[in-house]
Structures are given as structure tokens and as C-alpha cells.
Amino acid sequence: MSENHAHFQLAEKLLRDNADKIAALEKRRINHLLFIALTVPLASLILSPALMIIIDAQARADVMPYWLSALITFITVLVFIAESMDRGYRKKAKNDLLYILSQAINLKYRRGGFITLGDLYDHHVLPPYTHSESEEGFCGKAKGINFQFQDFHVTPTARLHWPDFRAIGSWGGFYGVAIRVDLGKHLDFHTILMPNFMATGALKRLIHEKFQEFDDINLVYNRFKIRYTVLSTDQVEARYVLDPAMMERFMTLKDLMKASWLEASFRERELVIIAGQTRNFFEVGHLLNPVNVLTLERCLLQLDQLCAAIETLNLNEHAGLGRPTPRFPKK
């Protein structure tokens, strides 16, 4: 039996076993659509004369025909109400369905996640930000490795020193998945790997301000060096952490997660991996799309993909991070 067929069969079973919950979600979806269909025309009918009067008063002339006012009002009200209703429905659908899916594959689910961005602060793997949003979080155990992962979005905001003190979004936001792995041992120093594009040009000046105490580690594995830059507060521990097998696994990890790039931090007892993504994870509810077996199958594949990525770390007890931690002299 192929892996994809196994996911499809599990999705079918979950659909049957949770038919009451799926039916309740579908009823909610239909009710939301009926509410939109009845409310939007009525609201447009009431509000469009007001819009026409306001525009004409501003222009001091009859510049807006009623049909145009009605059309603009209809589109505005439709977008506002549909977005609000869809957001509420997706929140409910995700909460119900991701709980069902996580139980089926021995994961624990929590809306809002298990990882706070404060937990990641000292790892230096995120850009500065003023707004953050964490959505779905999971934790579990794979091949003896305790892990947590969740998707999140951060947005930096620069406050301009203008009289109106307006805040504007600046370049450098991030959307993706964070993975936190318990290494089961304590590291004395801090090692970070980042894609090479983060260590060159203007971006190097921005990112490396955080790394005043870090040394650039010159590894001998050329295939890895082409893709990644390694920084560490200790040369010896960095080579212990990133042995050739671990470097190879990181390159495999990026492909498994279908990530646009990976960044990682080894600090104290934790390995934190940040994977930049160009797609949303765990989208299992939408007003225009009823929940069906394909919806569940797609989400199961995403969860399994992340678990498989974590399993690739598969620490070897005789080499690299899997073996007992050597004692390095403190600087």
C-alpha cells in the first residue's frame, strides 16, 4: 500500500468516525453563506444612498449615480461581512478538525501553539518584530525525540519620527514554521546556521549585528558550505554539533519540508529550526469549500511531512549530537 493511499484511507475513516462533527461544521458553513446572501443586499440597499449623499456633498455636485453608489457599497459590505464570517468559520473548523487529526497520529494540538516567540528570542533566528501571530501548534515524540512545531507570522514595524508618528511596515517579515527539538543534553555554547543569502550584502550588516561574539566557522563539507553559513561562540563545539551526517540531514530536511530556506540554532538543550514557507499550513476550513476526505488527507500529509522531517534528525548515539556531550573548556 502506498503512503498516499494510507493517508487517504485514514482520512476516510476519520470522516466516518466524526460524521456528527463534520455535519455540524457543514451546517454552520451553510448558515454563514445564507446570512451573507441575505444581509449584504439589504445592507447595500440601506447604505448606498448615504454613500451617494456623502460623495455629492464633498464634491458639491451630483457626481455619483445611484447604481455606482449601490455597486461600491455592495462590494464593500460583501468583502467586510464575508471576511468576518469566514474568519470565524475557519477558526472553529481548524479547532475541531486539527484536534481530530492530531489524535489520529499521536500528536497533541493546541490553537496558538506551544512555542512563544519569547522562547525563540535568545536563539537569534527571527528578525526584529512588533507584531506576531501564532496559529496552530503541535507537540509529540518521534524516534525518541521530543518536539514541538507550529506555524506563525511576524511583522516588523518601524516608527518614523514624523509629527504624526505614523508606524509603517518595513522589509523583513517572516511567515513559516518553527520547530523546537529537545536534544536531551546541554550545550555550553551557541551555534547557528543560516542560508548564505542572509550572510552577504546589505542583509549581512542587518543580521550580523546580533552576532558580535560569534565566529564564522569554516567547515570542510563544500556541498553544505555552498548553501549555509555557520556561526558559533565556540569552534570546537560547532564541529561537534554539525558533523557530516547532521549537515547532510539538514539539506534533506529542507527538501522534505518544501521550505524556501532553513535557519537553525543549537543552544543549551534545544535545537530550533525556522523554515520559511510560501504556503499556509493546516488550512482545513473555508466558507466556499466544504470539508471532505481530500481536505483531511491534505492536512494529514502536511502533518506527516513535518514529523518525517523531524525524524530525519535521527540522532546517532555513536556520533555527533547523539553521543555523550564532550566537555569543552569555558572561554
Image (spheres, rainbow, N blue to C red):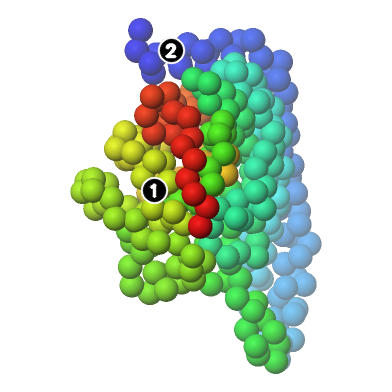
Most foreground residue, 55 or 104? 104
**Residue 236 visible in the shown view:** yes
Circle 2 — which element? helix
The residue mark sitting in front, 1 or 2, is 1
Q: Circle 1 is placed at which residue position?
A: 236
**Residue plotted at (66% across, 39% down):** 113
Circle 1 — which element? helix
Q: Position of residue 109 (x, y in %)?
A: 66, 29
Left or right placement of residue 206 versus residue 221 in this view = right
In the displayed image of the protein, which residue is found farthest to the front?
329
- Look at the picture and state if 79 lies above or below 67: above
- Look at the picture and state if 102 lies above or below 9: below
Q: Position of residue 69 (x, y in %)?
A: 65, 70
Quarter of the picture containing the N terminus is: top left
Image quadrant of residue 45?
Answer: bottom right
Q: Amino acid at mark 2?
A: Ala
- Look at the picture and state if 170 lies above or below 109: below
**Residue plotted at (29% across, 55% down):** 218
**Residue plotted at (68% across, 56% down):** 80
Q: Which mark is residue 6?
A: 2
Q: Amino acid at mark 1?
A: Val
How many C-alpha atoms fall within 10 Å of the one at disc 2: few (<14), some, or many (≥20)?
A: few
How many C-alpha atoms fall within 10 Å of the one at disc 1: few (<14), some, or many (≥20)?
A: some
Image quadrant of residue 29?
Answer: top right
Q: Position of residue 115 (x, y in %)?
A: 65, 43
Q: Position of residue 126 (x, y in %)?
A: 53, 57
* Inter-mark Cα distance, 1 to 2: 45 Å
Q: Which mark is residue 264?
A: none
